[in-house]
Image (tube, rainbow, N blue to C red):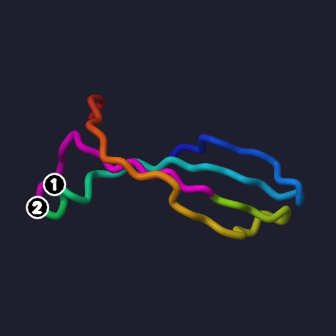
Amino acid sequence: MEVIKVARTEAGGWETAVEISEDSSFTKSFGVKKTNVLDNHVYEVIIYENFEVESYERIKYQSLEDEDV
């Protein structure tokens, strides 16, 4: 998980974006345990001023070849 954006909202809360990479669900569905293919998800998370989560939404999905694995 990597935080890729943090911005203050007009209401005093926070708008964040978090990127999560995990083993490909497509290759896992075939029983392949470890590959260099990753699913990459980016979520937008809105947080109130008191740090409670107001909302979250997946805003990007892509399957990538990760050469570092």
Q: Is residue 10 above or below residue 67?
A: below
- Does the CB distance between marks 1 and 2 fall below 8 Å? no
Q: Which image quarter: residue 12? A: bottom right
Q: Which mark is residue 54?
A: none
Q: Position of residue 53 (x, y in %)?
A: 70, 68
Q: Is residue 27 magenta?
A: no
Q: Is residue 28 above or below residue 16?
A: below
Tell me if 53 is positioned left or right of 48 in this view: left
Q: Which mark is residue 30?
A: 2
Q: Residues within 10 Å of mark 1 (few under 14, many from 20)?
A: few
Of circles 1 and 2, the one toward us is 2
* Residue at the extreme top of the image, as rendered: 67
Q: In front: 61, or 51?
A: 61
Q: In front: 19, or 69?
A: 19
Q: Which image quarter: residue 35? A: top left
Q: Is residue 42 magenta?
A: yes
Q: Which span is picked out in magenta?
A: 31-44
Mark 1 — residue? 33
Q: In percent of the image, x 31 and y 47: which residue is there?
A: 63
Residue kind at label 2, given as amino acid type = Phe
Q: Which element is circle 2 on?
A: loop
Q: Position of residue 45 (x, y in %)?
A: 64, 59
Residue kind at label 1, given as amino acid type = Lys
